[in-house]
Structures are given as C-alpha cells and as structure tokens.
C-alpha cells in the first residue's frame, strides 16, 4: 500500500512502507554469524592440518638429521680409533724391529765370540803354528768403581804337541807420561801389596786377573807384559798392549 503526500513548495519524495519483521532480521543475522563461524572453523581446521603436517615433516627431518649426526659421530670415533691403532701398530712394529735388530746384533756378537773361542781352543789343543810354546794371547782392561783403579785379565796359553804343566811368572809395567816426562811404572808401584810379579802354572791356558792403580797426573800409553817360563825349557817373551779400556 503506498501513500503519497504532496506539500506545496517542497520537493516531492516517494516513500515506501515496509512491514516490521524483527524475527526475520534476527534469523538473517544468526545465519551470517553461523556462516562466519563455519568459515573460521574450516580455516582453523585447515591451518591445523597444514601446521600439523608441517610439524610432522619438520620432526621427521630433525630425527633424520639426528640419526645422520649420530652415525657421523660414530664414524669419527671409529676413524680416530683406527688412526690410533695404526699409530700404535706402527710404534709396536718399530719397537719390534728395533728389538729384533738388537737381538740379531747380540747374536752376531755372541757368534763372533764363540768363533773366537773355537779358534782359541783349536789353537791350544790342535796347534799348527810354527811358533809353539808359551804365548801371551790377550789383555783385557776395565774400569772399576775406585778412582784411577783398573782391573785386568791376562790370558796365557801353551801351544805344544804334548801338554805338560808350564810354570813361571809374569811382570807387568805401564808406560806413559807424568809432568811431561816419560815414565815406566812397575807392578809393585801400581799394586797395594808391592807385588813385583804374578806367578802362573797351567797345562793348557790360564787367565790371570788383578788390579792396578795409576798415580794422579799419570797419562798411560801402553802396558808391557813380560812372561818368563821356568824349568828345562826356559822361555821369556814380551808383548805390548795399547792403553785401551773395554767399552771405550
């Protein structure tokens, strides 16, 4: 129903009369709220699903990285252990080689010593040299713990076809310098008992041992050994040895 009211002297407007329906408006407003709520819920659910999927993916990637890191750490430990084993093995091999080398050198020295002794015994028991009789074989000289005191070992042998006992005495003297002068010390001057000679008696060989003491300021050069055999086949021989200490 339309009502038109005209007033003179004013602009004319058309008016429409609409029925008053408050329930309808409330329903439309509620529907709008529901639509907004549904859209918000759907958006939230989609975001949650996407966020959860992303989180799961991130967690999986993190766990994978952790596994890779753990494996790398294990490999590093194994490699370090391998390097340590190689170094230790190298040291062990080097040490073993050194010990083997030392053992070989010791055996070579022992073999050389045994060969020398074999030659010595052959020379004594089976002489095939022209110069037979009493012989001065060797002289060993060593340091002692006492100042200017030395121990000696003198080896005498008898090279003969028939080995009878031989006896006699040995004189030992030391040549050197003292106060820039040549001097010769007798055994009596170098021994505590003022012994001038050392007696010997043997059938095949004899090792004479003793000690000598050198005066302070005396520079030794060589030892002179004089062996005198007594009896029917009297013999005297002399041999000089340079002043050489064992181990020097």
Image (spheres, grey):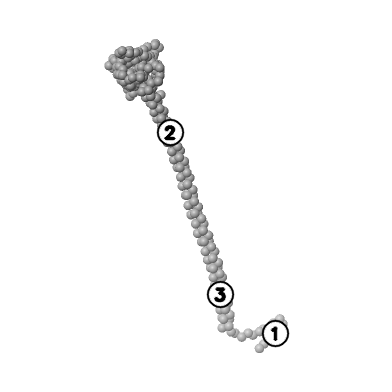
Which residue is located at x 55 percent, y 77 percent? 34
For marks 1 and 3, give the CA distance: 51 Å
Give the total of numbered labels.
Answer: 3
**What residue is at 37 percent from the left and 14 percent from the top?**
238
Q: Identify the element where label 2 is drawn.
A: helix
Please state which of residues 72 and 177 is positioned toward the viewer in this rendering. Answer: 177
N-terminal of the two: label 1 or label 3? 1
Q: Against 190, is 113 above or below? A: below
* Left or right: 206 as drawn, with respect to 75: left
Which quarter of the figure has residue 202? top left
> Do we see residue 16 in this rendering?
yes
Nearest to N terminus: mark 1 or mark 2: 1
Which residue, given by chain and number where applicable, does mark 2 sit on?
Answer: 104
Mark 1 secondary-structure assignment: loop
Q: CA distance from mark 1 to mark 2?
A: 142 Å
Q: Which mark is residue 99?
A: none
Instruction: Specify the quadrant of the image occupied by residue 161.
Output: top left
Q: Position of residue 112 (x, y in %)?
A: 41, 28
* Extreme residue in the left direction: 193
Is 139 on the left or on the right of 54, as rendered? left
Q: Nearer the viewer, mark 2 or mark 3?
A: 2
Tag 3 residue: 38
Q: Nearer the viewer, residue 201 or 238?
A: 201
Q: Residue at x 71, y 84 (%)?
A: 8
Estimate how packed mark 3 is, as few (under 14), some (14 to 19) or many (20 or more) residues with alpha carbons within 10 Å: few
Which residue was labeled with disc 1? Answer: 7
Mark 1 vs mark 2: in front: 2
Query: In the image as oriented, which residue stretches furthest toward the front?
Result: 162
Rendered location of residue 231, percent (x, y): 30, 13
């Amino acid at each position: 129903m339309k009502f038109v009211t005209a007033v003179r002297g004013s602009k004319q407007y058309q008016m429409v009369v609409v029925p008053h329906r408050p329930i309808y408006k409330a329903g439309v407003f509620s529907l709008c709220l529901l639509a907004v709520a549904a859209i918000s819920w759907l958006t939230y659910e989609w975001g949650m699903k996407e966020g959860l999927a992303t989180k799961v993916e991130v967690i999986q990637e993190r766990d994978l990285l952790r596994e890779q890191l753990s494996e790398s750490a294990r490999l590093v430990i194994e490699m370090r252990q391998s390097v340590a084993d190689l170094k230790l093995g190298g040291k062990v091999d080097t040490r073993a080689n050194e010990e083997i080398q030392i053992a070989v050198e010791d055996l070579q020295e022992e073999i050389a010593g045994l060969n020398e002794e074999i030659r010595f015994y052959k020379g004594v028991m089976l002489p095939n040299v022209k110069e037979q009789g009493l012989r001065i074989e060797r002289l060993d000289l060593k340091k002692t713990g006492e100042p200017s005191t030395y121990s000696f070992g003198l080896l005498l042998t008898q090279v003969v076809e028939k080995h009878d006992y031989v006896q006699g005495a040995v004189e030992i003297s030391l040549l050197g310098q003292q106060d820039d002068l040549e001097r010769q010390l007798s055994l009596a001057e170098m021994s505590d008992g003022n012994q001038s000679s050392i007696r010997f008696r043997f059938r095949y060989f004899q090792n004479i041992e003793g000690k000598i003491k050198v005066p302070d300021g005396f520079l030794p050069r060589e030892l002179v050994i004089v062996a005198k055999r007594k009896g029917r086949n009297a013999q005297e021989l002399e041999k000089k040895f340079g002043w050489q200490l064992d181990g020097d």
